[in-house]
Image (tube, rainbow, N blue to C red):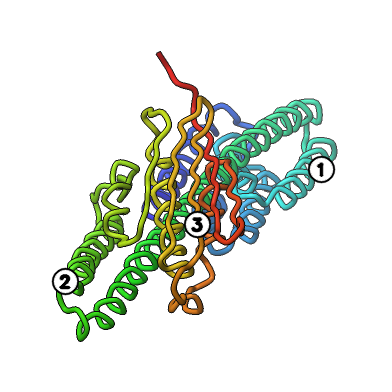
Amino acid sequence: MRKTAYLALVVAVFQVIASHGAHAGQLDRLRVDSLGTVLLLVGPVAILATRRFPITSLAATLVATCVFMTLGYPYGPVFLSPVILLFKTVAEGRRKVAWIASAITAAYFLVYSTWLVDRPAAGAWHVLAIVAVMLLILAAGEVARFRREGRAEHARVAEEESRRQASEERLTMAQELHDVLAHNISLIHVQASTALHLLDDDPSQARPALTTIKAASKEVLGELRSVLNVLRDGAPRSPTAGLDRVGELIERSGMDVSLRQVGSRPLPSQVERAAYRIVQESLTNAARHAPGAKVNVRLEYLPAELVITVDDTGPTTPAVLSEEGSGNGIPGMRERASALGGTLVAGPTGTGFQVEARLPLPEETE
C-alpha cells in the first residue's frame, strides 16, 4: 500500500508540473487551470483506489484523460496515469477489460483527431502515436502477466511437492511405527506367554523369556524414539535399522532362526531399511502364526538386485497370536518393495510359509 501511495504522489506531481511546462511548446492548447488540475489528479487518485476498484479506477482515469484532451489542454504528461493503469490491469489478469478499454479510447482519439481539432493531420499523428504506445503497454502487461502466472504456478507446484513429500514422510513414519510395534509387541507377547507357562513348572527356564522381554521392550523404546525424532527440527533422518542388525534381530526373536548371506556389497540406505523391515515383519509373522517352527533367512546379493527369502517349516505348537494381527504385515512389506521398484511374493510352501522379496540395486561402481 505504501508503494502505491508513493507512486500516486509521484504521478500527481509529475502530471501537474509537466503539463504546465508542456503548454510552452503547445501554445495552441489551453493553459492548465483549476479544472485541468482536477482532471490531472483523477489518475493518481485512481491509482490509490485500483486495488479495491480496479475497473472503476481504469474507467475514471480514461474518461478524465479524454475530457482533458477534449477541453484543449496540453498533450503528453496526462497520459502517464492511463499507461500505468492499463499495464496493471493486464498484468493482474483483467485482459478483456484492458483491451476493450484500449479499443474504446483509441476510437475516441480517432474521432477527436478527425473532427474535434483544428488541425486533423497533426491530430492524426498524435492518435497514431497514442495507439502505438497503447499496444506497447498492453504487450508489456501481457509479458508481466505471463511471468506473474509462471511464478504463481511454480510456487503452487513447489507447495504441492512439499505437501506430497510431507505426506510420504508421514506414511513412512507410520509404516516404521507399525513394523516396530508389531514385531516387538508380538515378541513380548510370545515370550510373556512362555514365561507364564514355565513360571510354576520350571522357573529357571522362564528367565530367558523374561530376558528377551526386557531386551525387546528396550529395543521398541529405542526404535520409537528414533522414528519420532524425525518430527523435531534438525533431527537426523538416517534409517533406524539396517541389515547389519539382522543378527541382533534374530537373537531377540527367541525362535530357531538360521541366517545365510550370499555375497555382500554396500546398499543404499532406503534398501537397507526396507530389507531389515521385511525380515523383521517376516519373523513377526512366523512368531505369530508358526510358533516352534524353524525359520531360514537368506540374503542373496546379486549384481542387479537383493533377494530376501524368509521361510519356516510350519507351527509345532498352537498359534496363540494367529488371530491378533493387524492384517497389514504382508501388504506393508509389498508396499516397501514396490516403492523401490521391486517385488514381494508371500504364500504357503508345503507345511510352512515363505516370503521372497526382490529389491533392485544400482550398478556397482569400481
Classify 10 Å Cα crowding around label 1: few (below 14), some (14-19), many (20 and above). Answer: some
- Name the side, left or right, on which 288 lies relative to 340: left
Residue 107 image-quadrant placement: top right
- Name the side, left or right, on which 17 lies relative to 248: right
Residue 25 image-quadrant placement: top right
Where's residue 124, x and y in %? Answer: 79, 29
Where's residue 165, x and y in %? Answer: 46, 51
Q: Please tell me the numbered disc located at residue 22.
A: none
At x 50%, y 57%, the residue is: 45
Q: Which residue is mark 1?
A: 107
Where's residue 212, x and y in %? Answer: 22, 66
At x 45%, y 21%, the residue is: 364
Residue at far front of view: 201
Q: Which amino acid, mark 1?
A: Ala
Q: Which residue is mark 3?
A: 45
Q: Are marks 3 and 1 in contact (CB under 8 Å)?
A: no
Q: Please report whichever mark, 1 or 2, sits nearer to the chain's N-terminal start.
A: 1
Q: Please report whichever mark, 2 or 3, sits nearer to the chain's N-terminal start.
A: 3
Q: Which residue is mark 2?
A: 207
Q: Please report whichever mark, 3 or 1, sits nearer to the chain's N-terminal start.
A: 3
The C terminus, quarter of image: top left
15, 80: nearer the viewer: 80
Q: Which amino acid, mark 2?
A: Arg
Q: Secondary structure at mark 1?
A: helix
Residue at far top of view: 366
Residue 204 image-quadrant placement: bottom left
